Amino acid sequence: MAHVINLQCRECKSEYPIEPLNACEICFGPLEVAYNYDSIAKAVSRESIESGPQTMWRYHDFLPVEKEAAIDISTGFTPLIHAKNLGHQLGLDYLYIKNDSVNPTFSFKDRPVSVTATKALEFEFDVLACVSTGNLMGSVAAHGAKAGMETMVFYPSNLETGKIMGAAVYGPTMVAVDGTYDQANRFCSELADTYRWAFVNINMRPYYAEGSKTLGYEVAEQLGWNAPDHCIVPGASGELHTKIWKGLEEFGDAGLIKQPSTRMHLAQASGCSPIVHAFEMESNHVNPVRPNTIAKSLAIGNPAAGPYSLEVLNNTGGTGISAPENTIIDGIKLLAETEGIFTETAGGVVISSLQRLVEQKKIKKNEVTVAFITGNGLKTLDAMGDFNKAVNTTPDMESFEAAIRSN
Ligand SMILES: Cc1ncc(COP(=O)(O)O)c(C=O)c1O
Ligand SMILES: [Zn+2]
């Protein structure tokens, strides 16, 4: 917090005070937190970070809140696993899985929400709210519970049971909106103008977005203070993709790592790939689509950070990949059967996209590659179908051996 200057418009650079604001009054561009990077560089070192807590809060100097006030349910510093089995199948020697599905509410969303809940208390809000494709609402409900705030979560009514129960358990007001995420989002923007609520991904978005940078910091630290050659990141609004890159760049600017030359690939599902489509058309404009995908957590047809995600793709030499719908479950099963990690549909999109990048020879055998697994598979059981082929037996040797023989 000591290093924060103000909010700044990403487009016209107009300056605003640190308040719950998200859009520029002059050009409607998104507002971002501006920092004094010289003072950050003086305050941090590899050693100071290494002696911090085993959570995302070891990077508090790069975040827009006081670490002492943090609403912290022990998020972050998740495992970076050398995926030797999957790497062997794909012909990659240095494939890593960043397993962010082991966060407290089983997705990476705990990172941005931990920052936002903290900031919401600082702004003296009583209500923490969000509009969600599923994972965000579980995280908002949990952090609201921890912060002693009232919580209101809005979501498209067709979400998976695991996502709904995974939020409802924390006791928020659940609002099922009869419509798509994009329709619910437009409605929530109206609500955010009317009620004094901290909508984490609307009026609190500048603070919310910062939390995801910690994924970039962590990966660099866990690779021995090196940026990877490739990142494969799942995309919905495109925010995560841009913020992992921002994290790597900031570490470069602070002298903690060499300036990164990572290729930032973006993975979307073919049933909802507006950013990838613009990338393939070599266009600067992201045309909205109506989502039709089993990867419901990625079903945002009109992505808020779409143009910036496109910029990151183009500036880093990344590739936008859309995973065919019929390969998503195969991707989930491949990761489970090789590395023992059960991810949700968004992770299936990442693994399928990784396979495609290798087939297209975009990733070489000896390049350090990080696939971001951002959500847990038990939340999207609805999408899996019934692939369990159990051997049925009564509890005796004869029946068991006969059943196994005929299997
Ligand atoms: C599991 C998972 N991964 C990735 C994303 C993509 O995040 P973003 O909207 O920042 O692109 C989401 C979004 O909800 C998600 O739930
Ligand atoms: Zn502006």
Image (cartoon, rainbow, N blue to C red):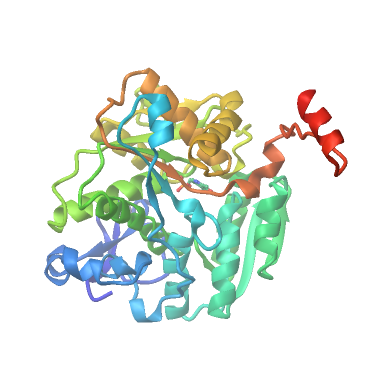
| Depth check, front residue: 157 or 47 | 47
Q: Does residue 192 appear to the left or right of 354 in the view shown?
A: right
| Depth check, front residue: 129 or 145 | 145
Q: Residue furthest front?
A: 397
Residue 246 sits above or below residue 303 on the image = below
| Depth check, front residue: 263 or 58 | 58
Q: Does residue 141 appear to the left or right of 116 in the view shown?
A: right
Residue 164 sits above or below residue 266 on the image = below
What x and y, as percent, mark residue 253? 15, 54
Residue 190 visible in the current orientation: no
* Residue depicted at 44% across the width and 60% down the height: 112
| Depth check, front residue: 120 or 256 | 256
Q: Does residue 20 appear to the left or right of 154 in the view shown?
A: left
What x and y, as percent, mark residue 360? 36, 18
What x and y, as percent, mark residue 386? 74, 34
* Residue depicted at 59% across the width and 75% down the height: 145
What x and y, as percent, mark residue 326? 61, 24
Quarter of the image with the C terminus in it: top right
**Number of numbered labels in the structure image:** 0
Quarter of the image with the N terminus in it: bottom left
Q: Where on the picture, by quarter, is residue 227?
A: top left
Q: Where on the picture, by quarter, is residue 122?
A: bottom left
* Residue depicted at 36% across the width and 26% down the height: 283
Residue 137 visible in the current orientation: yes
Q: Does residue 299 appear to the left or right of 158 in the view shown?
A: left
